[in-house]
Amino acid sequence: MLTGLLLRLITAHLLTDFVFQPTAWVIDRKENKIRSIGLLWHVCLTTLFAYAFSGLYNCWWIPLVIFISHYLIDIIKSYLPDNIYTFLADQAMHLLVITIIWLIVDHQWAAIITALREITSNNNFWILTLGYILVTWPLGILIGMATSKWRNELATTESAREGLADAGKWIGICERALILTFVLTNQYTAIGFLMTAKSILRFGDKDKKTEKKTEYILVGTLFSFAASALLGVILSYAIK
């Protein structure tokens, strides 16, 4: 379903939004916002690439839609905090516009609706969705409760307060998602490599002050790996 037009428009967007957008234009947009000249240059370049890559030179409305939508989305973004959430929202809006253009030109509305119905009516889709939801926050909360005894023991030590805020939480979410993916795809060797790599990083410091913290992290890691692997095995049987 990813026809040539959709792929070409996405390619044009990625090139102009990341590869060919100078840092000076980005800074100018953040500082001057709606009065930014750099933003105008960026939108013009994006429109030019989209029109050239589309190959549909008689469809004058395609560059017009790209110009107006890209300009408005980037103006709104310039007034919002610069973080991962605004970045993802910005990219999602650009891709939504591109997708709508593709649907209109290639008349793929019926095909998209049919595909969505097939996906959402498939039990395996919901089994996998449930699995990946479980390995993120719910399983993280469960592991946090299971290891609370040792976390409380470390709470008063200076070494326990060292480290990046929420880094452990996001590391845990990523590793559990990876473990689940490896189990579902029968890549058990990759699990061993992941666990070995994490153990080396955690035990590279021999300082006695961090020994308890390292042991606490290892316990949490083992809980995380075991729970994710067990969930992956259960889901594999459920899918079969």
Image (tube, rainbow, N blue to C red):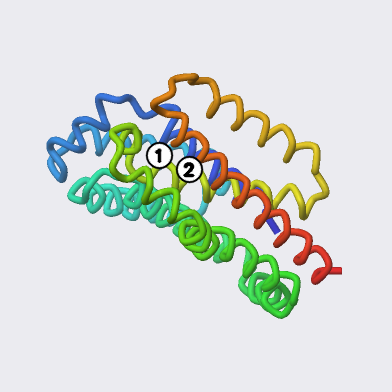
Callout 2 crowding tier (Cα within 10 Å): few <14, some 14–19, many ≥20: many
Point out which mark residue 128 bears: none
Callout 1 crowding tier (Cα within 10 Å): few <14, some 14–19, many ≥20: many
Q: Quadrant of the N terminus?
A: bottom right
Amino acid type, mark 2:
Ala
**Can I make out residue 5 in this image?**
no
> Do residues under tags 2 and 1 come within 8 Å of each other at their CB atoms?
yes
Residue 69 placement, left or right of 199:
left
Residue located at (50% from left, 40% from top): 217
Location of residue 80 with respect to 190 vertically, above or below: below
Residue located at (42% from left, 38% from top): 48
SS for dot 2: helix
Disc 2 from disc 1: Cα separation? 6 Å
Look at mark 1 in the image and give the residue it sits on.
46
SS for dot 1: helix
Residue located at (42% from left, 28% from top): 210
Residue extending farthest to the right is 240
Location of residue 153 with respect to 114 vertically, above or below: above
Q: Position of residue 216 (x, y in %)?
A: 49, 42
Residue 149 position by quadrant: bottom left
Residue 185 placement, left or right of 119:
right
Point out which mark residue 50 bears: 2
Q: Position of residue 151 (x, y in %)?
A: 41, 49
Q: Quadrant of the C terminus?
A: bottom right
